[in-house]
Amino acid sequence: MKIALFSAVPEEVGAWGSRFHFTGIGRENATRSLLDFVTRHQGEEYTIVNVGTVGSHAFPVGTILSIDEIVSAGSVFNDFRMQPGHFSLSPELEVPHAILYSSDSFVSPKVYTESHFSAIKQQAQCFDMESSALFSVAASFGIPYVSFKIVSDNLDITLDIWRERVVELSKKMDGYLEKMFEILGAEIMI
């Protein structure tokens, strides 16, 4: 099995950074980055694995999540459901499953009106800015897609605090990835 690892920025994956492809922040950057990768690797079989941080109102900071479904902000007319795949992992690597809301902005009460913020919290347990684009590109090319996220905040911090916190969180994610890839025995595409 071959796997291509994607994350928005190097801070999210710490010591594993040399094994990742980085998209930059946001759906447009993610789209361009993955399209470029897919073009360079036409005809190859692999799985896209997206790893990164998410804000969450439902899980504590430091919780690693496996994403079951992605809701794309502003795209209520999608003609397909965004449902990432999963790996069969040993019980010690089982993590909570979640629905992720992917938008073009940080999700917080400072960004959205109270009623809109309340509505999107009912749709998903966690939030990021790249997943819907990555899933859409992968699905368009028939490439399997799996996503693991670690909760960096409870929708209540600034970017500066995120930068401080993500250093420790990336160490936890690195440990998880190390165990997961030991079990999978997968080749990582660099």
Image (cartoon, helix red, strand yellow):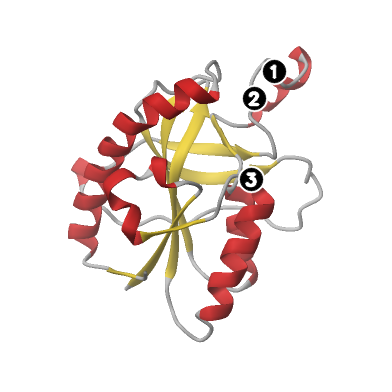
Tag 3 near tag 2, CB within 8 Å? no
At 64% from the left and 59% from the top, the residue drawn is 31
At 74% from the left and 21% from the top, the residue drawn is 112
Q: Using the image as rendered, state which of residue 21 and residue 5 is in the foreground.
A: 21
Residue reaching furthest to the bottom: 43
Q: x and y percent of residue 96 in the render? A: 37, 35
State the residue position of label 3: 26
State the residue position of label 1: 118
Of mark 3 and mark 2, the one earlier in the sequence is: 3
State the residue position of label 2: 122
Could you give the CA–CA distance between mark 1 and mark 2, rounded to whole angstroms? 7 Å
Q: x and y percent of residue 176 in the render? A: 25, 44
Could you give the CA–CA distance between mark 1 and mark 3, rounded to whole angstroms? 22 Å
Could you give the CA–CA distance between mark 3 and mark 2, rounded to whole angstroms? 22 Å
The answer to whether residue 138 of the structure is visible from this angle is: no
Tag 1 near tag 2, CB within 8 Å? yes
At 58% from the left and 57% from the top, the residue drawn is 134
